[in-house]
Structures are given as structure tokens and as C-alpha cells.
Image (cartoon, grey):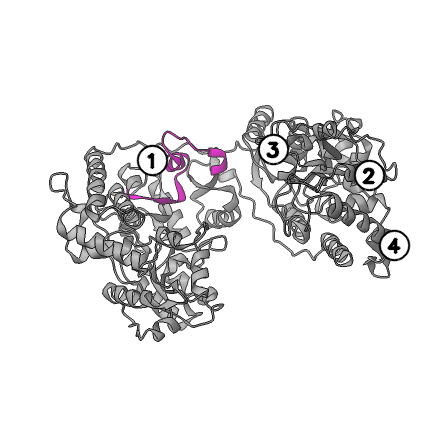
Amino acid sequence: MLRSTIVFLLFIAMLSACNPNVAEVPPPTRPTTAPLNDPSVTTITFASYDRERSYFEPLINLFNRENPDIQVIFVDLEEVGEQEAMGILHTTVSAADTTIASISPEDIAKGYVLDLKPLIDADATFDLDDYYPGAFEPLSSDGGIYVLPTTVRAPMIAYNKTLVEEAGITVPEELTWEDLHTFAAIVAEEQDGGQQNYGLMTINTGVESFMVGLEQAGIDPFALSQDDLDLEQPAIVTVLEETQAMIESGAIWHAVQYAQRLEEFKPIEFPNIVMELAQAQRLAFWDTRSFLLPDAAESLPYEVGFVPMPDISLPHDLPNQEGYIISSGTLHPHAAWRWVSFLSEQMPLLENRADQSEIPARRSLSEQRQETLHQNNEYAAALRVALERPKTHPAHFNASVLWALHSAVDMAARSDESASEILRATEDEIANALWETNTPTAIEPVVVATPVILPAGSTEIRFGIAARSQELGELVNQFREAHPDIYVDIISIDQGYGPSAIPQFVRTSELVDCFTWNAVPPTEMLTTTLDLRPLIEADTTFLEDDYPPALLGYFEREGGIHGLPLHFQLRALAYNEDRFEDANLAPPQSDMTLDDFLALAEQMTRREGGEQKYGYALPFSGPLDMWFFLEQFDASINQEGLQGPEPDFTNPAVVEALTFYVDLLREYSPHEDLPGYAGGIMIDYIDSGASAMWMDHSYGALFVDTQDSEDVVPHLVAPPRNADTIGPSDVIVDGMYISAQSPYPDACWEWLTFFSVHTTSLYQTSFPAR
């Protein structure tokens, strides 16, 4: 067992040491600021979050080149913030002429967005028929089009072919709700070892069936006025009773009814519950919005069928639409239209979406994604039928009425009250909603902010950083006041972990002018970052002696300095002083050896009795302190070979170090498994006082979450050592770099030297490097 644990630790170390090949990433085209000062050029703005900048910025550059009379400026919503009084959409349409957003009928009623229908009608080049009819949500009764949708998801039903065939059911290509309810009831009657089988699961767990019943009874609850509101009429009571009976029988799966059948509490989450029931063959039909698309369905032990979901004219969820919109406050609607219509012709950003069933809303674009439309013939056929169906909702839709009816179905599933009693309470709720509806919606005037246009001759630099904050924004503003000719554009970067860290470092250096990096600089910085030595020597105000030479050494390569330390953390041994006082033992000392430390950990471990105590625990999610023990035994996992570093796992020093480490964790810590791979959250052992000692870096060890145990006050000493030297893993140095490809090294130098002396508030658990 010990041997297998050590082998696993060595495997982790080997992965951490890997240097993968770096893929070539083309640098972005830098937008020019010259045309923005030309009065013959119309300047408009587009707002999105910085995480999507890498998608939209190349499109902005392309549009600006192809349309020299219009220039689009990117507005970062991370910097705009949210004004709670008005809401995020009002803030967004006030910050930019155009944006991508999800809007609702309420947003249209408040006058936030521009009606695109007149612009569409006037544009002979715009092909509205290229959109699937199902792409447009009916958000308003005035016939307007307020958003150009980017994606569409068609309502479909998936089903277990084996289960329905065994029940004697033949599913037609055009399924009706009557068919679906009949089939669901048949399957729900089938029992398997006493377990309940379920007929139908929809995303709104029964609301769809309730709305279908109202529709078939000729009742439109959204058309009811305060004067004729009568939910207790026999037809509505009957529909709710039928829905209640289907839920009770299992014909309709409902979370409340399902939970009540479980013998023990179990959290119910989509899409996990769908996969769980589908794999157990206890679910016959399900709404594909719940999960299980063709790729996931292939892992099931049976064939999955697909049919379009039957039509429902009454809404069963809140109508909303994501896509490109124009602010009602824009002063340049025609220029804004040319931009959003251009965007609508581009392949939408789909990679980061959790919903893998979304496809482009335009036919011409969706046909380019062959894997979606053709991966499963039956799925593709059902999808095409569903996409061609236009969506219909009542013109007098009221969201509050919809949520009240949702609540009625939930009450029918969870309560012993009769349908009449539930509907009586729902009627009061809807009456209040209708009263609020009769109050005219206040139109919020929108004024788009004037875009920030850089003065002629000014320089824009792109500064990459992993963590944005309000303090960082304030620093940028202070710098602009002192350097009005330099504009710092904050770019969020992803540093990656493990093997992906080095490619991300290279990619970052190609995407921005300067950046910070929270890790030891890789050897690739020699070619990807600028040697700062000439800038240091040319700057008489820069004090190189303000940095400890050991920290500068991290960035020195071949006589140059390819980065500057920004802040650093030191390894420390933290301990719970109260634990040592209770045990009548002296706490750890700074001159401890490893053997002293091991003996102390043994003395502080108590495994007898109900409340166990431990001498040592890890506060992080992986065995990161493994490097410390390797260094203390002067153990290297690599040796130089003919073609570079080679694994040296059988080195006796490596085996000795890891044996010491594994014994420490096994005998004197709560770790039955390596943290991060199995076991619990180790920080809990520290918070509760169960662990006497732990390692962390810098005075971050003092920031243990003691909300539940306020008596835990960590104290710090230097870690135990076999030698006087400081190991590479004992110090974590974060650095600042200027990209080798940046055309603005001098502006970057001005910003980085300013940034380096104003970062105390940004890095509160680290020491400033200066």
C-alpha cells in the first residue's frame, strides 16, 4: 500500500513537471484610434463582458475595416458595474449603443430596447427568412422585433424505446398531448421490483400538462380580468385534479413527489436525476431541455427515440430572448443596425454554453454545424420539425400569473389540500398581480453614455490580470490622471493549471502588452517577454535596490531581467496555540528539525475516544507540501539524461522523503486518502480545532475561516528543516511582464512601475516585493 501511494505521488509530480508543446496563437489585430476623431465617422459602442472579448474583438476589427464610416468600440461590462435601482439591463443599454443580452416582455414595456422591425423592413439585404420561425419568442403584442436571436433550442421529447415497446406503445412521429399523457400513464403502472417507474418528465414538472388541460378546456388564464377572475370554476378544478392525479401516479415526474418516495433525504438536481432515472430504465419520456441529447443518449443501454414536443399555445415558462439588441437611447440607430446585422451573420459563441442542444438561430449558420443536425437521423428530423414551428404566446401575457399557476401545480404535488383550496389561494395571488398590471409601466428614459475616445497621439496598452477588482479600477483611474496620454485596458486572463499553464503563458504574452502571472516564470519567458534591463537602466527614478536580490533572481535569465517581482508569499508552519496549551506541550519552534516536528505531531494526535485530534492536516486541495519534504531530503525526481531531464523515481532520497511524508499523513493526520482526490475538506479540521498544525504560505495562514470556531487563532513559525537553505517551493513569487511583441514597451513600463507601488490593497495575503 505504501509503495502504491508513493508511486501515485511521483505520478503527480511528473505531471506537474511536464512542459507541453506550445501551440501558435495569432496575435490580435489592434484597433486604431485615429478614425474615432474624424467627424465624418460615426462611433458606436458594443457592450459585453471581458471573458467574451476574445470572440467579439476580432469581429469588431473586421467590421471597422469593412465599414470605414462606422467605428465600433468595445465596452467592458466588468467596468460598468450594476446599478441596483434600475437593474443590469438598464445599466447596460445606458452604457452602450448595442449589446448581447437576454430580454423579457417587461424590458420592452419599460422602453429599454429599440424596435428593429422598421430597420429590418428598410434593409433589402437582410434575410429574415434565414431564421427558424421557432427562434423568435413573441415578446410583445405590437408586432415588433426587439432582438436578433443568436441561438435557438427546439422543444423535443426523448423516450426509451425499449420501455415503451415493452409496454405495447407505438410512438407516432407527430405526438399529441393526449398521446403523451396516455403513454405516460401506461408506463407509470408498470412496476419493477416495487420501484416506481415514471412516465413523463418535463422541465417545469407538470406545469406543461396543466396548461394543456386549460387550453383543451378553452380557458386562457391570461385573458381573465379582475372582474371575471374565477379559478374555482369546475373546469379549472378538474384540470388541476387531473394534473394532481398524474403526479401522484407517477405518470408525471415531480421533484416533491419523487422525494417523498425516497427512504432518505437526497438532493435532486437537473440533469443528474434525468440520467439516473434514464440509466435505471425508470423513465419513459423526458423533455430534452432536461438533458440527455444524442451524445449522452449513446451511453444508455437502450436506443433513445426523439419526437417534437406537442404544441402548447399557453406559455409554460417565462418568455425571454437572448441575442443582439440596440439601446433605445442610441443616437445612431442606422449605424447600430449595420453592426448588429453584421454580428447576426457570424457563427455565435457556443463553446462555453452548458446547453449543448443550442444551435445557431439562422439556417445558414446551423447547416455549418453538421454534427448537431446530422449526428442522429431521428433526432435531426424531429429537430427540424420543431424548429419550423413558430412560437405563440397570448398577447396579454403576465409573468406574475404564470408564476402563480406554477405555484398551484407545486402545491398540488406537495399538499393534502384540495384542488379547490389551492386554486382559491392562487386566485388571490393572481388578483394582486392583475391589479399591479393595471398600473401603467413607467418608461425609463435611456441615454447612452458618450464613448471614451482616446485623444490623438495617445497610447492604449492591454494589461492582462487574472483577478479584477474595484480597487484595480481605481488604480487605473489614478494612473490616467497622472498619464493622460496612456490608456490602460484591463484584460482578464486565464492562467491555466498543470500542463496548460505554459501554453497559457505564451498565449497571454501574444494577446496583451503587459501582464501579471501568479506562478514561477517558465523558461519560455526568454522568447515571449521583453528583457527589462534596458528600461531599468534608462529610468533614473527606478530603484533596483528596492527589491531583494533573491526575488529578482527568479526573473534573471542569460544576463537579462525578463520580469519584475510583484508580490510574494513564504511557507510558514501555522499552529493552534490552544491545542498545545491543553496538551501541556511547548508549541512549535522556528529551529525545529523534521524529527522534532514528527515527534510533536505524534504527541498531538489522539485517535481514542469520540473526538479525535490530529497533529497535522493539509489546508489545500492537493498534496502541495510534498515538494517541501522532497527538498528537505535533497531529493530530485529528475536527473539529466542524454535528451534532457529523465524521471529518477528510484532515487533513495526520493523514496526516503516520500516515505516520511506518507507516514506523517497516515499516522498523524485525518487523511485516509490524498486530499483533492478523495476524502473531505481538510480546512474543516483546522477550523474546528481538530488539527494542531498545518502549512501555508505567507500570512495567508492567518486567514483561516474561523467563522464557526472563533477561538482558533493561528500562530506562525518557520517550517521545520533538515537544512538551512530555503527550497524553491518555499517562496511563491508573482511577477509582472512586458510582452516581447508589444509595440508600447515604454508605456507598459510606466504602468508597471506605478502598479508595483500601489498593489497592497489588491494582494492582502501577500508581501509586496518592493
Residue 243's x, y, as percent?
25, 55
Residue lying farthest left? 227
Q: Residue at x 19, y 56 (%)?
A: 215
Q: Which amino acid does label 2 sit on?
A: Ala
Asked whether the beta carbons under mark 2 and mark 1 sit within 8 Å of each other, the answer is no
Image quadrant where one finds the N terminus: bottom right
Q: What residue type is labelled 1?
A: Gly
According to the picture, the residue beneath numbered tag 2 turns out to be 599
Judged from the image, the secondary structure of the residue bearing numbered disc 1 is loop
Q: How far apart are marks 3 and 1 (CA)?
A: 46 Å
Residue 49 - label? none
Nearest the viewer among 225 and 271 is 271
Of the two numbered discs 2 and 1 on the same chain, state the one appearing first in sequence.
Answer: 1
Of the two numbered discs 4 and 3 on the same chain, state the one appearing first in sequence.
Answer: 4
* Quarter of the view holding residue 177: bottom left
Q: How far apart are marks 4 and 3 (CA)?
A: 39 Å
According to the picture, the residue beneath numbered tag 3 turns out to be 705
Task: Classify residue 740 as left or right of residue 172.
Answer: right
Q: Distance between the residues labelled 3 and 2?
A: 28 Å
According to the picture, the residue beneath numbered tag 4 turns out to be 652
Asked whether the beta carbons under mark 3 and mark 1 sit within 8 Å of each other, the answer is no
Q: Is residue 92 magenta?
A: yes
According to the picture, the residue beneath numbered tag 1 turns out to be 329
Of the two numbered discs 4 and 1 on the same chain, state the one appearing first in sequence.
Answer: 1
Which segment did they paint magenta?
76-105
Task: Report the mark closest to the observer, 2 or 1.
Answer: 2
Q: Distance between the residues labelled 2 and 1?
A: 72 Å
Nearest the viewer among 361 and 194 is 194
Q: What residue type is labelled 3?
A: Asp
Image quadrant where one finds the C terminus: top right
Task: Classify residue 260 as left or right of residue 351.
Answer: left
